[in-house]
Image (cartoon, grey):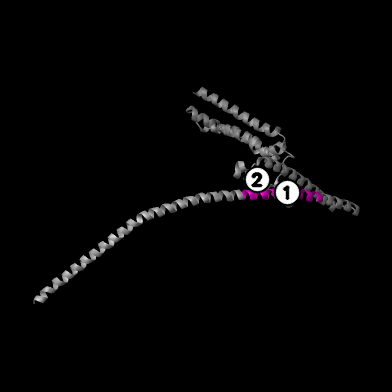
Amino acid sequence: MLEMTGWYLVGLLVHAVVVAVGGIAAIRMTPRTSLPARLRGNGARRGWIWFSLSVLPVTLVSWMSVPAGPWPSSVLVWYTPTVVYTAVALWVAFGWSRNDRLAAAHAHRYLVPADFDARGSDLLADVQKTINTLWAAGKVMGESFDAEQPLGVLRAEEWRIASALYRYQRLRAEHGKETADAASDRVRALLARQNERQEAAYEQLSAQVDPIREYGAAVGEALRAHTEWEQIERAEAREERISELSARVSAEEGASAGLLRDEALSARAAKEARDELIDRALAAGRLLSAEPGGRG
């Protein structure tokens, strides 16, 4: 058992050394631009190196704190630190930096909301609203409305308009800076003509969104009409059930009304008979109580 335990200790130490060396090599050999943003500074890199080295004392502590015992429990506890350190390293390499890697892989092929000012965001929002309406119409109306092809066209238009807006905004920002630094009236006149052209391009781009807005409004009306039709169908189906319920209630009420009337008459007759009998009994009692006095 002692010999087996010694081999376990050697395996643990070898595993810990491999994890530590791998962590240090990764942080030293990976370009800073490929690392997660929080690990690019010198202090963060030194912290990662110390973290990688700490697997050695942590592994020894786990070895000394858990005595040799049954194979599953002891070995699992001994190897837990190195497994945890390996999982952390893999997450940092492939999980934490996932967004950075995707951004680098798809550079110049995507845009984010922060890339647009308020005017550009409003223009794109109209296009995206039409896309969302079209998607909802295809989902609600099913086979009666083919949304796949127009969705592809609209998504291509969305990217085209977004790219043009982004270029326009960059040109506009450069124009503003150049205008502020203009050295003469001649330069300012040239910049003014350029501004007119770039603003005309924006107006043309804005006009290209108008048909998309109109299409979105038409799809929205069709979607509302379809929803209204479905609601009317459900209401009509419910009307049939209500009519059936009313007829059933009326039939049952007609069948039982006569019986109830007969029962009521019987009860009334019984009450009248009872009252008559009670009156007779009371009269007889009064006569009975009056006879002794009459005799006297």
Residue 11 in magenta stretch: no
Q: SS of the residue at dot 2?
A: helix
Other-residue count near label 1 (Cα within 10 Å), few / some / many at <14 / 14–19 / ≥20:
few
Q: Nearer the viewer, residue 154 or 142?
A: 142
Q: What secondary structure prevails in the magenta region?
A: helix
Residue 58 coordinates in the image, percent (x, y): 57, 34
Q: Magenta region: which residues?
A: 200-224
Kindly identify the amino acid type of the residue bearing the numbered disc 2: Leu
Q: Is residue 177 visible?
A: no
Other-residue count near label 2 (Cα within 10 Å), few / some / many at <14 / 14–19 / ≥20:
many
Say the numbered circle drawn on residue 134. 2
Residue 114 coordinates in the image, percent (x, y): 71, 47
Residue 207 coordinates in the image, percent (x, y): 76, 50
Is the residue under label 1 in contact with that under label 2 (CB below 8 Å)? no
Mark 1 highlights which residue?
Answer: 211
Q: Nearer the viewer, residue 142 or 19?
A: 142
Count of numbered labels shown in the rendering: 2
Look at 11% across and 73% down and name the residue there: 291
Left or right: 60 as drawn, with respect to 206: left
Residue 124 coordinates in the image, percent (x, y): 71, 48
Q: Nearer the viewer, residue 271 or 14?
A: 271
Which one is earlier in the sequence, the residue at label 2 or at label 1? 2
Q: Is residue 225 visible?
A: yes
Left or right: 24 as drawn, with respect to 289: right
Q: Nearer the viewer, residue 13 or 170?
A: 170
Extreme-left residue of the structure? 296
Look at 41% across and 55% down and name the residue there: 250
Q: SS of the residue at dot 1?
A: helix
Kindly identify the amino acid type of the residue bearing the numbered disc 1: Pro
Say the numbered circle drawn on residue 4. none
